[in-house]
Amino acid sequence: MLGNWSFGDYYKRESIVWGWEFLTGVMGLDKSRLWVSVYKDDDESFAIWRDEVGLPPERIIRLGDLSKGDEENFWSMADTGPCGPCTEIHYDQGEQAKCDHPKGCFVGVCSCDRWLELWNHVFMEFDRQQDGTLNPLPMKSVDTGLGFERLVAVLQGKQSNYETDIFTPMIRRMEEISGKKAEGEARISMQVVADHARACAFTVADGAIPSNQDRGYVVRRILRRAARHGHLLGVDEPFLWRIAEVVIDEMGDAYPELRERRARILDVIRKEEERFIRTLHAGLQVYGDIRDGMRAGRSRPVDRRRGVQAARHLRLSGRPDGDRRGRGRLHGRPRRVRGVHGAAAGQERHRGRLPRGSRRLASPRGTRPGRVPQPLHRLRRGRRRGTRDGGAAGRS
């Protein structure tokens, strides 16, 4: 994300005029393909676009209406606090990208790819109160956001961010590693790998380490999700560090810290991948035993005890819940597999998210806050009226 800020300095006129100058003068975008939207009552921004930029009035669209609960083109950080109108710059990608929305394909009506929002200029000038009153702020400010990948896609004439030269080198490397073409479902997995490899390279360069806490937990989940998609592509050995090499080579000139910390980035990513593969294989082994036992008609209590073991392995491996459900579908099981996806897995998830050294437990369904989770035979009956087990509230 690109952007600029002003705290009590320049305001609407400068932000709008400079933004237009950058897109049309510096980036060379076709003026005839740019449309803008403003908040319904923001006459000042409308006048700047019409009179100073010279945009035809029919290409300036008024949107939103706070009185009707429509906050389109009105930014706020929460129900109360700083807020204000915003103006958005959209790029028309042409008739070939239009949709068949019943009310027409147009800015503010549909959300298709034809009208691509490039840049949002937020003008914070109010302090919203609990009753909805908008009091003027003592200092007016500007906060803008320009989509970097979207801008590159427009400049290179691509319909997808992943077709630009930001991602194609990483996708090509993934084709070499997996031996597959970037087509269909394989392309989706390769796009996930490319995006996550870039995120991992930058966060590790910034000092983050995969862990179970704080930003380290985010890095771990991103890295392991990428590893899972590599697994779907048939790659079982560590590979993400090789994609991270491409990130460093491609972006190292603009971000020299990537080159300076190259060895550390690759080492951290590779070791985390190796750790994930070990725990993943252990968890899948337990899962396979449970699956085979259930197919053979083994008694349910055995399944639940094994479910605790499987949930523990899967928690340690860092696999998201959706991955486990996907694994069940691959083996012909329904979306929800008893003994793995029920109370036992829920108990393990809550156990895994406790702060280190804490004795106070988060409450899985069927327990009260601060209490130690109940035994599984009680969780099965549940504490809520209308539930059949601790994790089935509201499900059919």
Image (cartoon, grey):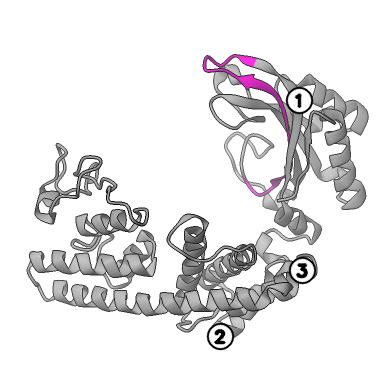
Residue 150 is inside the magenta segment: no
Q: Is 168 positioned to the left or the right of 4 in the image? A: left
Secondary element type, mark 2? loop
| Residue 329 in view | no
The residue labelled by disc 1 is: 140
Q: In x, y percent, where is residue 286?
A: 24, 75
Q: Is residue 128 magenta?
A: yes
**Mark 3 and mark 2: span between their CA atoms?**
31 Å
Q: Residue at x 56, y 24 (%)?
A: 80
Residue 182 left/right relative to 323:
right
What residue appears at the point 72 percent right and 49 percent down from the top-left corner?
Answer: 95
Residue 370 vertical position relative to residue 200 in the rendered view, above or below: above
Task: Classify mark 1: helix, strand or loop.
Answer: strand
* Disc 2: which residue: 179
Q: Looking at numbered disc 2 in the image, what kind of residue is underneath it?
A: Gly
Q: CA distance from mark 3 to mark 1?
A: 36 Å
**Mark 2 or mark 1, earlier in chain:** 1
Going from the N terminus, do you reach mark 3 or mark 2 first?
A: 2
